[in-house]
Image: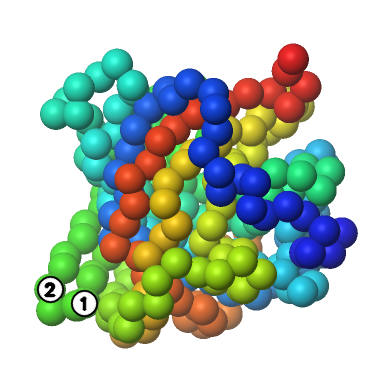
Amino acid sequence: MSTGEIDRIAPTLRPSTPVRGYQRWRTLLFAHWEVDAEVLQAMLPPQLTLDTFRGAAYVGLVPFWMEGVRAKFVPDGLGMAFLETNVRTYVHVDGRDPGVYFFSLDAESALAVLGARVGWSLPYYYADMTRRIGDGVIDYSVKRIGKDEPRLDVRWEIGELLGPSKPDTLEHFLAERYFLHCERRGRIYSGRVHHVPYPLAKARTLQFSDQLLGADGIDVSGPPQLVHYAAGVDVEIFDLKPRDAD
């Protein structure tokens, strides 16, 4: 299915269903590589179809900071804050609901890892993580705790502000994703989030060393081909539901 046949605007609209939680995502790096579509499709659950932009498939690495992570009934002052990094690609379900599929997610909060694994069936891992910010440069490191202990060390420089990406652009395709899809006991579940469009900026990697993609079985060569930055967005979280639910 071609990129243009998928409705990419409807997912950006706020759902009418009840909000279940809140999060604030900050200092996001969007690092991307173009990869072989057939290889990537073979790594997905069979119910999901790889989403492509003008025939090209992408895998992304997104390190960022989360704060105010809480259920709707929890006061903002009691929300959690922690670093997180995800390895992801882009999928749709029968031509609908373009979203993300996560190969792995690393977080420095053991509680968040446990909650996401149990409640959302997402492949979270506990990791030691650090972030340092100064003079428009961000240093970010990850060391997963456990088998093989893959690492990520990246330094990037924030560039010119681009603002919200326009529909039908590669930036919009990569950044503006409001569905997540995951597999649980052979069924596909989908969840939604809502936020204003990312205030994207240009970015440039100054140092880059990654083992997370390799640990997920994804073979890329060298630093990311596309790099963007976003200062952050405030996020509403909605239910995760099975696709065949009434």
- The vertical placement of 17 against 194, above or below, is above
The 10 Å Cα crowd at callout 1, few under 14, some 14 to 19, many 20 or more, is some
Q: Is residue 216 left or right of residue 151?
A: right
Q: Residue at x 32, y 69 (%)?
A: 153
SS at mark 1 in the image: strand
The 10 Å Cα crowd at callout 2, few under 14, some 14 to 19, many 20 or more, is few
The answer to whether residue 93 is seen in the rendering is yes
Residue highlighted by disc 2: 134
SS at mark 2 in the image: strand
Residue highlighted by disc 1: 137
- The vertical placement of 117 against 12, above or below, is above
Quadrant placement of the C terminus:
top right
Q: Residue at x 49, y 29 (%)?
A: 238
Task: Give the percent coordinates (x, y) of residue 7.
Answer: 73, 52
Q: Are marks 1 and 2 in contact (CB under 8 Å)?
A: yes
From the viewer's side, name the closer residue of 125 and 85. Answer: 85
Which picture quadrant has residue 30?
bottom left
Which picture quadrant has residue 21?
top left
